Every structure is written in C-alpha cells, then in structure tokens.
Amino acid sequence: MNSTYELYYHQQEEQHWWFKARREIVFNLIQKMRLPHEAAILDVGCSGGPLMLALRATGYQNLTGIDVSESGIELARQRGLANVSVMDGSNLAFADKSFDLLIASDVLEHIENEEAALREWVRVLRPGGTLLVFVPAHSYLWSQHDEINHHFRRYSAQHLRTVLRTAGLRIERLSYWNNFLYFPTAVFRSVQRQLPTHAEREPVADFHHFPAIFDKAVLQWLRFENKLLQHVDVPFGVSLFSVAHRPS
C-alpha cells in the first residue's frame, strides 16, 4: 500500500460507509456461524482492529490479528488489542491447526503468490475450520484505486472458486457483494480509463468524501443488502466473498 495513503486508510476505516458496510457483512457472516465464544479466530489484515473490537464486544476473547502495516498494528494496540503483530499473511508464524476461523478481508489480492498464501491459511486452520475471504471483483473494474493499494489482481467467481478448491477447501458459499454500486462503478471506471490524462495522473483511491446524505443513503442500502445476503447469494457486485472449510 502507498505509504501516504496508508495513513489516510487508517483514518477512514472507522467512519467511511464502505468500511462500515463491509465490516458489518463480515461480522454478520461470523455471527451466523454460531462459533462458541472460546473459538480461536485469526484476522489476517486486521489493520487498526475494528473488526476484532466488534467481535470482542460480543464475547469472543481468543482473538489474534496480524497485518503487514506497522502503523495499523500500533493503532490496534492503542485500542487495547494485545494479541496483534506485524506479520506476512503468506508466511504465518503459527503452529498447524491453530485456528477455528481465519478472516481475510481484502488481503488475498495484495499477495503475489495467492496459492502459497492459501496453503498457509489452510495449514493453520483446524480440521473443519472456516476461511472467510473477501476480494475485489472483476478485472475490468481495475482502476487507480487498485494501483495505489498495490493489488496484484481482481477476482472472478470462477477464479476464486478454483484457487480455493486447489488449496483443498470445501466451499460453502461464494457470492458477490455491493451490487448496488456495481453498475455506477463499471460505468465510471470505463469512462475514467478513456480520459486522455488517465495515464499521467497520480493514482488516487476511491474513498472520497461525499455529502452526508449520500453517505447515509449508500450505507443504508448496503445494510439492506447485508441482510439479504444472510439468506441468498447475489450474481454481481464490486466485491466477492466466500465461506469455505478445511475438510474434517
């Protein structure tokens, strides 16, 4: 991640509607798993720890977080999260079969060797353990946002399904997320690529400031979609997620 953008990212992750909505769908999916509160949970790419704090508030105590960002881990510690450390998500310093759940929200696209990362994630999962993974969707939505975040790829459903199965995981769910903004995003990024100065501009991220009424409206719609995703999968969206298990 661009170092200047990294600070901005940590400032945004608490309040921006996109971070809020994604964190809530991840939280909802975990709640639906009905894990016992003593379950061992690893948050890969925990950043400043907002998801870990939400899980801790509902009774989960056996929480571990890692991130490559030193500033993110320092922020997590300032927020009272002790079991967090700077670590490469594709080279984990944990024993085999250590965790019941591994969460990787928008992490896999940052790792060049996705196969090696998934092998590591499966290694540290206990038999029957769960991987919850979110990734950005569709290569044709590639933009400056991906560049400034140092992404290696965006995913199709088939690509994600293939790499998860190759890693030995059994897929329970695979669905797109954020379908509300899919068509506006596709149009905007198509137009953006056609602009003559596109290649000359400094890359910028998508986390812009909008009027409060817009932020509230988008967040409410995504919360509606989050509730819908408790029951059904959706066929298109800006992001993609999967719930998969290491076989018992």
Image: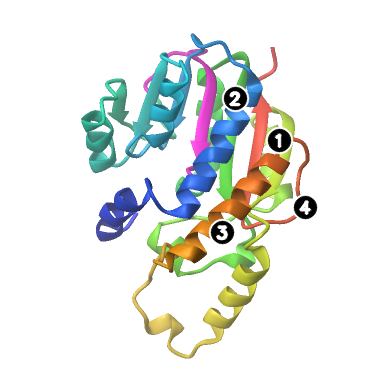
As drawn, the label of residue 137 is: none
**Mark 4 or 1: the one toward you:** 1
Q: Which residue is mark 4?
A: 235
- Specify few, some or many for label 2: CA neighbours under 10 Å numbering under 14, 14-19, or 20 or more: few
What amino acid is at disc 3?
A: Val
- Specify few, some or many for label 3: CA neighbours under 10 Å numbering under 14, 14-19, or 20 or more: some
Q: Which residue is mark 2?
A: 31
In the rendered structure, are the residues bearing label 2 and label 3 in contact, judged by CB atoms less than 8 Å apart?
A: no
In the rendered structure, are the residues bearing label 1 and label 2 in contact, judged by CB atoms less than 8 Å apart?
A: no
Q: Is residue 101 magenta?
A: yes
**Mark 2 or 3: the one toward you:** 3
Between the residue at mark 1 and the residue at mark 2, the CA separation in whole angstroms equals: 10 Å
Residue 61, placed above or below residue 198: above
Query: In the rendered image, is residue 194 in sight?
Result: yes
As drawn, the label of residue 230 is: 1
Residue located at (59% from left, 15% from top):
35
Q: Which residues are magenta?
A: 93-107
In the rendered structure, are the residues bearing label 2 and label 4 in contact, judged by CB atoms less than 8 Å apart?
A: no
Between the residue at mark 4 and the residue at mark 1, the CA separation in whole angstroms equals: 15 Å
Give whichever of discs 2 and 4 has the lower sequence position. 2
Q: Which residue is mark 3?
A: 218
Foreground residue, 118 or 66? 66
Residue 149: quadrant of the picture: bottom left
Q: SS class of the residue under badge 2?
A: helix
Between the residue at mark 2 and the residue at mark 3, the CA separation in whole angstroms equals: 23 Å
What amino acid is at disc 4?
A: Pro
Give whichever of discs 3 and 4 has the lower sequence position. 3
